Amino acid sequence: MAEFTPEQLLELVNTSQVAQGNERVRKIAHRVVSDLFHAIEELDVTADEFWAGVSWLSRLGASGQIGLITAGLGFDRLIDIREDEADQNAGRAAGTPRAIEGPLYIAGAPQSDSQARVDEDPPRGEVLVMEGRILDTDGNPVPHALVDVWHANEKGRYSHFDPDQEAFHLRRKIRAGADGSYRFRSFIPPGYAIPPNSPTSELFTALGRHGNRPAHIHFLVAAEGMRTLTTQVNIPGDTFLDDDFAFATRDGLIVNLQPGVSPNGYESLDVNAPFTRARFDFVLQKATSPDEARPEARMDRVAAA
Ligand code: DHB
Ligand code: FE
């Protein structure tokens, strides 16, 4: 007998098994497939609608833009909200707030000690030096933290994903000093927008949504015995600060810009004229397990696991 009602089919899909498989994967897949079966039935999704969705997913995967969709549909922020809740329940709410990594991190940026010039001549915007210290939640310096920084170019695009930029353009790793200090020079980046004429923009157009993010700079900060921090800071005054397509901006992560700072002491960063400075300390929590102190980004973590 191979004639099924939808419920009988769903039951078969979810219970067929010739080997043990992975219990956790089985449980999650069971739930997701069940929810989709029910959505198709309740919304009376047609065959053409279903296959249009599959076609879109295929193009999305081929374009490498799945991570853009998870951010734009709020999943990345959801994961952060849940981690914040878990921290709060464990009495751990402290330190610099986490913010989403985003889909555009690339491991292996050039590394230097204490400071770095992240951009290249000629400056492609207002010269910015960001500087501060890595501290623990008691306010003590964390020595020799690794600060991995990345941001978009003057057109709002990221190297590696943009064929017009050199490898690791606007991506650097800085080994902070024994006193926890770091600094780097770059330029104030503009905002970012999802790529036009892409599977991502296709969905957001159909949803009547924009794909803009306010100007931001990303960080992955790691140090021995400390919990790795993924965060980003925002440039004040951006129109999209409270209307971020990725819902990722947070209070406490908007930097203060000091214009007209004297270049004295900044010559080693090629700064020879008054510039704009942002002072920002990153506050790390103590790690409660070696896993929390792993310095990898999100995909590298799971690939290595
Ligand atoms: C996306 C892009 C970003 O630069 C970012 O920080 C977060 C999300 C995106 O396109 O989804
Ligand atoms: Fe970004």
Image (spheres, rainbow, N blue to C red):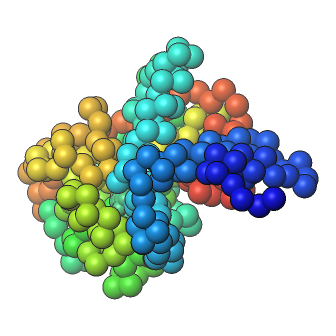
Q: Position of residue 216 (x, y in %)?
A: 28, 53
Residue drawn 15% across and 56% down?
A: 275
Residue closest to the far right = 19
Instruction: Using residue 173 as the reference point, say whether residue 233 is left or right of it.
Output: left
Q: Observer-nearest residue: 279 or 9?
A: 9
Instruction: Using residue 202 as the reference point, say whether residue 286 is left or right of it.
Output: right
Residue 222 shows in this picture: no
Q: Observer-nearest residue: 113 or 21?
A: 21
Q: Position of residue 87 (x, y in %)?
A: 52, 23
**Ligand 1 quarter of the rendering:** bottom left
Residue closest to the far bottom = 164
Give the image quarter of residue 60. Answer: bottom left
Number of numbered discs on residues: 0
Residue 23 shows in this picture: yes
Above or below — where is 52 with respect to 86?
Answer: below
Above or below — where is 301 with respect to 145?
Answer: below
Q: Position of residue 10 (x, y in %)?
A: 67, 49
Instruction: Using residue 225 as the reference point, say whether residue 285 is left or right of it.
Output: left
Residue drawn 55% across and 50% down?
A: 37
